[in-house]
Image: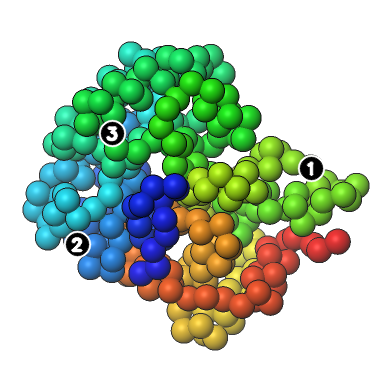
Amino acid sequence: MKKVRFGTSNEKVAAVGLGLMRIQTADNPVEVLNTAYENQIDFFDHADIYGQGQSETIFADALEKSVVKREDIFIQSKCGIVPGEMYDFSKEHIVQAVEGSLQRLKMDYLDSLLLHRPDTLMEPEEVAEAFNKLEREGKVRHFGVSNFTPGHVELLKTAVNQPLQANQLQFGLLHTGMVDQGIHANRNEKASIDHDGGILEYSRIHKMTIQAWSPYQGPGDTGVFIDNDLFPELNTLLKELADKYETTPTGISSAWILRHPADMQVIIGSMNLNRIEQIAKASNIQISRKDWYALYMAAGNGLP
């Protein structure tokens, strides 16, 4: 399994992380954890809202019955979304959310905490107070964000003392906005519009690990793009390259993300044991520059 540095820390984590949003749908959560760990996936991603908290509870119960030891894995959770109501980065909410996650996870600390989607009412000083308290009490070791622009990050950095190690962003073959603007820079084309504030380059400069979420999703409500008749050109090439690199279309879709020199992580949400194994093995595949661009174009993108 390919490893990447977690932000500016000395931590090395698996390039493929397992997202636990759907663990409540797993037939056997213990097998899911064992399969992931046996394939060198040591990074597990949660959020307090996943399954209304049940995902963390199910994970904790499965962990106790699995071969996996807490000290051998990296546990991340996210907070800040109050479903259907608001985003809340108040000190009280952040602290209570972490304490709730730790209670459900039956753990003393999180390896990483991300703020989940920007709260426009965020007061950086209040977030800093929460981070300081959680770090001082040993409840969180590293901090980061999710779905933030460079402006959001810089605003938060005016007050927080801790390095912001990661930013979880949607990225994949059919969500290429982070690279489109750079490829089409200085052009009067739709793809040249910068929707993210140059977050890809910003992350590389500041050594923030980009965690690609929903990497296999198509646009809108089209669902997963792999083996999807709506995307025939892309799937034809995925199958050709899967044969070439002795993997699967899902594996190639993962390798496409990991080929980028930003040293991203892929956060997968599958509870399918075979798919977890396929994606983990594909983390070691280094596709060529030519094949990377061929996939980019087969996904519907052009080169100026």
Binning the other alpha carbons within 10 Å of mark 3 as few (below 14), some (14 to 19) or many (20 upward) gives: many
Task: From the image, tell me which residue sits under label 2.
Answer: 34
Label 1 is placed on what type of residue? Ile
**Under tag 1, what secondary structure?**
loop
Binning the other alpha carbons within 10 Å of mark 2 as few (below 14), some (14 to 19) or many (20 upward) gives: some
User: Closer to the camera: disc 2 or disc 1?
Assistant: 1
**Under tag 2, what secondary structure?**
helix
Residue 135, percent from left and from top: 28, 29
Task: From the image, tell me which residue sits under label 1.
Answer: 193
Q: Residue at x 23, y 53 (%)?
A: 73
Can you tell which mark lies on residue 140? 3
**Which of disc 3 and disc 1 is earlier in sequence?**
3
Lateral position of residue 58 relative to residue 269, left or right: left
Lateral position of residue 264 relative to residue 82, left or right: right
Residue 121, percent from left and from top: 53, 14
Q: Is residue 104 above or below residue 28?
A: above
Q: Is residue 294 above or below residue 34?
A: below
Label 3 is placed on what type of residue? Val
Binning the other alpha carbons within 10 Å of mark 1 as few (below 14), some (14 to 19) or many (20 upward) gives: some
Q: Residue at x 64, y 61 (%)?
A: 230
Q: Tell me where residue 16 sits by quadrant.
A: bottom left
Residue 125, percent from left and from top: 46, 15
Lateral position of residue 106 relative to residue 272, left or right: left
Label 2 is placed on what type of residue? Asn
Lateral position of residue 175 relative to residue 143, left or right: right
Return the residue nearer the eye: 131 or 279.
131
Return the residue nearer the eye: 223 or 87.
87
Q: Is residue 105 above or below residue 219?
A: above
Q: Tell me where residue 103 sits by quadrant.
A: top left
Q: Tell me where residue 95 sits by quadrant.
A: top left
